Amino acid sequence: SEYSLGELDQQPRLLRNPSVLFPRSIKDANTGRVVVRVAILPSGRSEFVSVISSTHDELIPLAERIANGSRFTPPTRQGKAVKAVMTWPITIKK
């Protein structure tokens, strides 16, 4: 089973995420945002679930890479590591 943030002992904290290069094809902005749904496994590893919204479609593959390659503090419920699903707004900068 999986839990939402409100059911956890505390919100998982981001420990590290992969660096990505802002696409050259985006000329009109220095920053963009992709809101994704991620699953955080009991180990703290994150897995991409889906895209909710995006300022630039070119950023979606980068956000997927970040969502699949990040590590959080393990989500816990009543002291036990569990799987959690959350919405994560990922900002990507030049």
Image: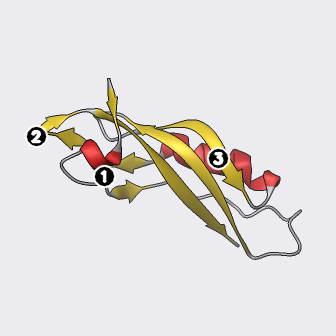
Q: Which of the two discs, 3 and 2, sits closer to the camera?
A: 3
First in residue order: circle 1 vs circle 3: 1
- Residue 58 percent location from the top left of the image: 80, 53
Q: In this figure, which residue is indicated by the disc labeled 3? A: 52
Residue at 61% across / 44% down in the picture?
Answer: 65
> Callout 1, which amino acid?
Pro
Give me the C-alpha separation between circle 3 and circle 2. 30 Å
The total of numbered circles placed on residues is 3
The foreground one among 32 and 5 is 5
> Callout 3, which amino acid?
Ile
Instruction: Report if residue 50 is visible in the image.
Output: yes
Q: In this figure, which residue is indicated by the disc labeled 2? A: 79
Instruction: Report if residue 74 is visible in the image.
Output: no
Mark 1 in CB contact with mark 3 (< 8 angstroms): no
Residue at 75% across / 76% down in the picture?
Answer: 30
Task: Return the residue found at the far left.
Answer: 79
Secondary structure under the numbered disc 3 in the rendered image = strand
> Callout 2, which amino acid?
Gly
Left or right of residue 45: residue 47: right
The foreground one among 7 and 59 is 7
